[in-house]
Amino acid sequence: MDKAPNYRPFPFVEAEVAGKYFEKKRIHIAALYKIPTPVHAMVEVIIMKKFELAVVLGLMAAIFCGNMAEFAGHVSGLEDSVLRLHILANSDSEEDQMLKLKVRDALLAESDALFAGCNSPEDIRARAVEVQESVRLLAQAVVEEHGSDAQVRVQLVEMDFDARQYEEITMPAGTYDALRILIGEGAGKNWWCVMYPPLCIPAGAEVTADTDNTALFFDPETLSILEDAPRYAVKFRCLEVWEEMQDTLEHPAAPQFRPRPQHTEISARYA
């Protein structure tokens, strides 16, 4: 009995065959190899399924990348549109912490005069550079008035912040510009608020957030991020992974985890 033909397996593809009899005609390589029709059909189905899966995965990846790019744009826009006030106490002693709050109150009481006419993030940053020495002298006077010899330093910096809740809004973790006031060693607990948009409102012995006016400064999507942070927790985690992947692609030879500087002086940018 003749043995069954030893057909060579070959994927179902199409090829352009040039020749005397098949010039400019498409033929199935599978047919040349005499693959039986059921097997032939099965190969077609398998390849079609793989193709469909690849298309679906490609569409999902495109949608994910589009969503991440849009979300990253909102977060980046938020970081660019905010100037934070960051005051660091000399230490965590009760006296140093109280002194920090006295400096805060004095600065907020003068903030309208110091930053009058600032109607954009660019305006407030440029003015922050102009009034750095005035802010330092104001804070230094408060420190000396309360019997401390701690020296005050004032910087306009770009620095990393963790996610922080400020009454009804939550500022997501990110890199923000901040007017940074260090009292003495600056080793104590800090106090912060949003200087621009002007959300720091003195209220007696406390400082509250002027959340009624947030809609004047942020678009609806950014406002939703600020006011409903838990809803975006998964997106923020995906964004972290997305940025790590981008960072790895941009710096393939660098270590996977590179510590970023805590803050960078940026006064020269706006001088």
Image (tube, rainbow, N blue to C red):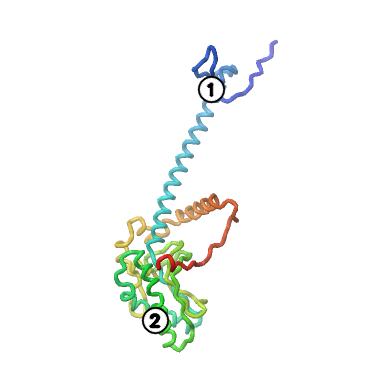
The reply to whether dot 1 and dot 2 touch (C-beta < 8 Å) is no
Which disc is residue 122 wearing?
A: none
Which disc is residue 15 wearing?
A: 1
Q: Nearer the viewer, mark 1 or mark 2?
A: 2
x and y percentages locating residue 126 in the rendered image: 37, 68
- How many other residues sit within 10 Å of disc 1, few (<14), some (14-19) or many (≥20)? few
Q: Is residue 13 above or below residue 185?
A: above
Q: Marks 1 and 2, how far apart in space?
A: 81 Å
Residue 250 left/right relative to 211: right
Query: Which amino acid type is shown beneath numbered disc 1?
Result: Ala
Q: Nearer the viewer, residue 243 or 220?
A: 243
Query: Which amino acid type is shown beneath numbered disc 2?
Result: Leu
- Mark 1: secondary structure: strand
Q: Looking at the image, which residue is at 56% across and 17% down?
A: 31
Q: Looking at the image, which residue is at 30% across and 61% down?
A: 215
Residue 257 left/right relative to 167: right
x and y percentages locating residue 57 in the rendered image: 48, 39
Q: Is residue 247 above or below residue 94?
A: above
Residue 195 left/right relative to 9: left
> According to the image, label 2 marks what residue?
138
Q: What number of labels is visible?
A: 2
Residue 8 left/right relative to 74: right
x and y percentages locating residue 241 in the rendered image: 51, 53
Q: Quadrant of residue 18?
A: top right
Please identify the quadrant where the N terminus is shown. Answer: top right
